[in-house]
């Protein structure tokens, strides 16, 4: 027997290819090449108007710095999964516009209960959780950029990352009122 | 293939023994049922999990078809491999990993010792069994294990558990974050001491080839930087010393020969081809479930009930620390999640004369970051904007949980047998009957739950929710119980099988009783004690 070191790749269902493919797809679109190997949802990204509107709406629903690449993935996935239609985006923007809204509190109460409100809440939830659906095998759009970590980022690390160094943490407990900027 | 020592299993026990014997000049071949992967792959698997799945500590370790282990993300997955029955079947859903490196990939790193009293329960309280040797015999091996694993801990005797030590910890203690300090202060108001844990995590400095802990708060399910000991950190070192590691090699039969000595181990590779390896000494260290399973599968005319099983004790006395969880909502923020995921416990509640009547318990303020939990709860309320952010921060900071881990006595009816259901290779799945028993149930009712309520009150809890069902602590013990009498035990004081002079079964399965703390340091100490015996035996050969 040789002393060859045997190593295994990460199993296919959990490997990196999904995130790499998604990021790679975005890069390819940026270079204006749309080949036959692109994911099915790539067609929707050609519709700049839809994705721009989605980001505009996201910025109104979630009043924080939003990553455009994450937004592209979310926009496409929401449309492909029929969780959001271009008409709903237009309708929600219309409600915001009618209220001359700058932040979500300005227009959210005016969104009627039903599919439109569900869609708005799903957009918000996706930005915070990094997934459309929090279920086994669901696609993760982002881990570290999911906004759910930000309201506590002054104290709690994003698990697996670190915000201090060796023994660099203390028992200091900041007030709840000191909300971080993000 | 041949070596002086065949080691089945590449977890903490197998790796410690392999390295000790390599250092002593013996050749070692290790068989590992599962795959061998790099740390970054596990970290990326974890980050690619949907938020709730990140709670399932085995989820970043998808099993290979030939080496199944428990996956618990869905009830269907949970029912797939371990076949569980009995009044507390749910409480034996043990998480362990059949990967090179074993279950220490996703342990919390806590290294409690047993106390002298923990080892003589029969003499002192007329319950359970006495260990076949005393604390003083094990103490030097505890020290050796602490230095092998790189354990940090307090230098003040009043903060040590137990404060009976022949040598300081190799590193000083880790600092508390705000949550554990808050719990320590609250415990003091009800007369209890929350001790900083001894933990196999590098405190302030590098140790061996591992860097210092930076508080990534992800010890479970994987330390992303290898600051916590896991056996995977020793695999390349073992190879550099000449050890051979064979992953995807599923041992399925131990072959006996003349004088009932072990003469070979048979394994399947990932394509179902069979192979046979031989050695002078055989070590089965596949954790407390897979070890008895392999022994029971290995029947022959000399050993009709399985290898090492003339006592009929293989697979019996299955133990763990049955756990209850207390969910708390607090008026003031606790801010858990700063530092490692676990770092302290109340231990004194595990000791006392009450042990003649009911169990004791350990109380731990879990220190996992709760941002995800806070966000999930706040989003479920339909909140938006500033109200959403405010509620996430409040939920993350002002909720917490206390884990209560109880001491379970060895009992013959808590038993692992071979299921009629087969796995991908056609090997029987393990079937386990589990009842935590009246000793634990009474301890919960009259002692641990009332104590937890006092702690909750001291913390200023506005809401207290105590789980009604015991769950697993993943501390698998007892299936090859140690003792002096071959009629009622499986291994001797060196973890050598009574029935086979060249077969060693070290680790959790050999433990006579388990106390309230996690079992890993005792497993490691037993491994090092067995290593000495193996070295001596090989020398004689």
Image (tube, coloured by chain):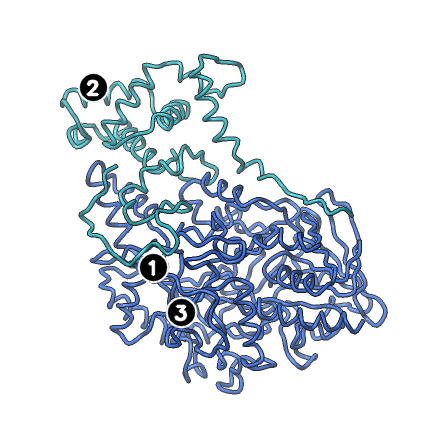
**How far apart are the alpha carbons under marks 1 and 3?**
24 Å
Q: B498 or A2, which lies in front?
A: A2
Tag 3 residue: B154
Q: Where residue B278 sits in the image (x, y, percent)?
A: 80, 59
Which residue shows up at 21% across the image and 44% down it?
A179
Specify few, some or many for label 2: CA neighbours under 10 Å numbering under 14, 14-19, or 20 or more: few
Chain of the residue under label 1: B
Give the label, 2 or 1, closer to the camera: 1
Q: Where residue B334 sits in the image (x, y, percent)?
A: 27, 57
Tag 2 residue: A94
Say which element carries label 1. strand
Q: Is residue B411 left or right of residue B108?
A: right
Say which element carries label 3. loop
Q: Are marks 2 and 3 in contact (CB under 8 Å)?
A: no
Tag 1 residue: B401
**How far apart are the alpha carbons under marks 2 and 3?**
62 Å
Q: Where residue B153 sits in the image (x, y, percent)?
A: 43, 67
Q: Is residue B157 above or below residue A68?
A: below
Q: Is residue B500 visible?
A: no
Say which element carries label 2. helix
Q: Are marks 1 and 3 in contact (CB under 8 Å)?
A: no
Colour of the chain lettered B? blue
User: Dividing the picture into quarters, in which one does residue A73 lie?
Assistant: top left
Q: Is residue B309 left or right of residue B362?
A: right
Marks 1/3 same chain: yes
Colour of the chain lettered A? cyan
In the picture, the disc for residue B25 is none
Which residue shows up at 56% across the image and 75% down it?
B140
Q: Is residue B442 above or below residue A66?
A: below
């Amino acid at each position: 027997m040789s002393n060859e070191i045997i190593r295994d790749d990460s199993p296919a269902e959990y490997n990196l290819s999904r995130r790499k493919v998604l990021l790679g797809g975005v890069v390819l679109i940026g270079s204006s090449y749309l080949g036959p190997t692109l994911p099915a949802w790539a067609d929707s990204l050609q519709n700049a108007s839809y994705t721009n509107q989605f980001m505009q709406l996201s910025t109104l629903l979630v009043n924080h710095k939003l990553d455009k690449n994450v937004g592209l993935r979310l926009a496409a996935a929401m449309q492909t999964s029929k969780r959001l239609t271009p008409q709903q985006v237009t309708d929600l923007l219309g409600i915001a516009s009618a209220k001359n809204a700058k932040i979500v509190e300005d227009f959210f109460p005016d969104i009627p209960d039903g599919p439109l409100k569900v869609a708005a809440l799903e957009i918000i939830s996706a930005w915070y959780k990094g997934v459309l659906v929090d279920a086994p095998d669901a696609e993760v759009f982002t881990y570290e950029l999911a906004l759910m970590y930000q309201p506590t980022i002054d104290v709690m690390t994003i698990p697996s990352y670190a915000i201090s160094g060796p023994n660099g943490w203390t028992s200091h407990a900041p007030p709840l009122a000191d909300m971080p900027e993000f | 293939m041949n070596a002086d020592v065949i080691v089945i299993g590449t977890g903490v026990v197998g790796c410690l023994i392999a390295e000790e014997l390599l250092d002593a000049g013996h050749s070692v071949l290790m068989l590992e049922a599962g795959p061998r992967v790099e740390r970054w792959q596990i970290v990326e698997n974890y980050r690619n999990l949907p938020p709730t799945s990140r709670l399932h500590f085995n989820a970043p370790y998808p099993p290979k078809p030939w080496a199944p282990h428990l996956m618990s993300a869905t009830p269907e997955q949970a029912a797939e491999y371990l076949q569980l029955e009995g009044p507390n079947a749910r409480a034996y859903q043990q998480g362990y990993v059949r990967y090179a490196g074993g279950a220490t990939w996703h342990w919390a790193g806590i290294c409690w010792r047993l106390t002298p009293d923990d080892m003589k329960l029969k003499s002192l309280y007329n319950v359970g069994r006495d260990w076949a040797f005393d604390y003083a015999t094990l103490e030097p091996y505890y020290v050796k294990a602490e230095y092998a694993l790189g354990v940090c801990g307090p230098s003040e005797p009043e903060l040590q558990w137990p404060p009976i030590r022949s040598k300081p910890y190799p590193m000083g203690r880790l600092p508390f974050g705000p949550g554990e300090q808050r719990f320590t202060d609250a415990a003091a108001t009800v007369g209890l001491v929350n001790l900083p844990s001894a933990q196999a995590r590098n405190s302030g400095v590098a140790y061996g080839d591992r860097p210092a802990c930076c508080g990534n708060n992800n010890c479970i399910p994987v330390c992303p930087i290898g600051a916590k000991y896991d056996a995977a950190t020793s695999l390349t070192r073992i190879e550099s010393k000449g050890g051979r590691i064979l992953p995807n090699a599923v041992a399925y039969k131990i072959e006996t020969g003349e004088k009932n000595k072990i003469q070979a181990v048979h394994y399947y590779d990932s394509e179902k081809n069979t192979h046979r390896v031989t050695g002078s000494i055989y070590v089965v260290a596949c954790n407390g479930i897979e070890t008895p399973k392999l022994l029971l599968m290995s029947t022959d005319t000399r050993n009709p009930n399985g290898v090492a099983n003339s006592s009929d004790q293989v697979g019996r006395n299955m133990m763990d620390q049955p756990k209850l969880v207390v969910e708390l909502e607090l008026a003031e923020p606790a801010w858990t999640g700063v530092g490692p995921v676990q770092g302290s416990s109340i231990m004194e509640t595990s000791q006392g004369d009450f042990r003649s009547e009911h169990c004791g318990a350990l109380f731990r303020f879990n220190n996992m970051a709760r941002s995800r939990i806070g966000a999930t709860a706040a989003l479920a309320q339909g909140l938006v904007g500033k109200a959403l952010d405010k509620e996430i921060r409040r939920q993350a900071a002002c909720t917490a949980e206390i884990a209560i881990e109880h001491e379970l006595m060895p009992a013959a009816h808590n038993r692992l047998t071979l299921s009629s259901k087969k796995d991908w290779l056609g090997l029987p799945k393990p079937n386990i009957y589990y009842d935590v028993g009246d000793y634990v149930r009474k301890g919960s009712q009259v002692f641990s739950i009332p104590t937890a309520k006092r702690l909750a009150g001291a913390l200023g809890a506005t809401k207290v929710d105590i789980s009604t069902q015991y769950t697993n602590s993943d501390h698998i013990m007892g299936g090859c119980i140690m003792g002096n009498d071959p009629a009622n035990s499986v291994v001797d004081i060196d973890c050598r099988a009574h029935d086979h002079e060249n077969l060693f079964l070290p680790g959790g399965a050999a433990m006579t009783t388990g106390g309230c703390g996690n079992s890993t340091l005792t497993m490691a100490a037993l491994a090092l004690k067995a290593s000495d015996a193996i070295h001596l035996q090989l020398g004689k050969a």
